[in-house]
Amino acid sequence: MLDLAAEKSGWTKPAQAGVFRGIAFTEAFATIICQVVELSLNGGAVKIHRVVSAVDCGTVLNPNIAASNMARWSCLG
């Protein structure tokens, strides 16, 4: 998942000036998720530019619920 998230986010390419990247990885309830966040700071305010997620949720019984959960995990503000 780390490799996939890094590839899809363009991790190896330099970020734009003033834009910072972070990467997070977790496993819970038989689901693996990795996210790359691109953000910038303007004074004390944080601006989220992009979130790239790679998810392996195993067997999916209801694709609509799985998609809804992924959207919720990526919602930062």
Image (tube, rainbow, N blue to C red):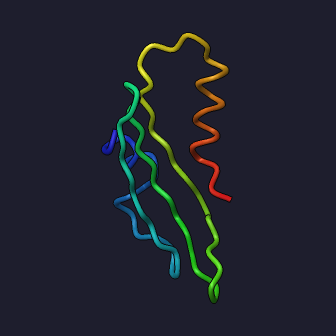
**Looking at the image, which residue is at 39% across and 63% down?**
13
Numbered disc total: 0
**Looking at the image, which residue is at 45% across and 39% down?**
54
Query: Residue 34 lies in what quarter of the image?
Result: top left
| Position of residue 42 in the picture relative to residue 15 (left or right) | right
User: Picture coordinates of residue 51 (x, y %)?
Assistant: 55, 53
**Looking at the image, which residue is at 67% across and 20% down?**
64
**Looking at the image, which residue is at 38% across and 33% down?**
28
| Farthest residue, direction front | 29
Query: Residue 44 lies in what quarter of the image?
Result: bottom right
| Farthest residue, direction top | 61
Q: Nearer the viewer, residue 4 or 75?
A: 75
Above or below, comparing residue 5 to residue 12 in the picture? above
The N terminus sits in image quarter: top left
User: Picture coordinates of residue 62 (x, y %)?
Assistant: 61, 13
| Farthest residue, direction bottom | 43
User: Picture coordinates of residue 6 (x, y %)?
Assistant: 37, 50
User: Picture coordinates of residue 20 (x, y %)?
Assistant: 47, 72
Above or below, comparing residue 3 to residue 47 in the picture? above
The C terminus sits in image quarter: bottom right
Above or below, comparing residue 8 to residue 28 in the picture? below
| Position of residue 60 in the picture relative to residue 62 (left or right) | left
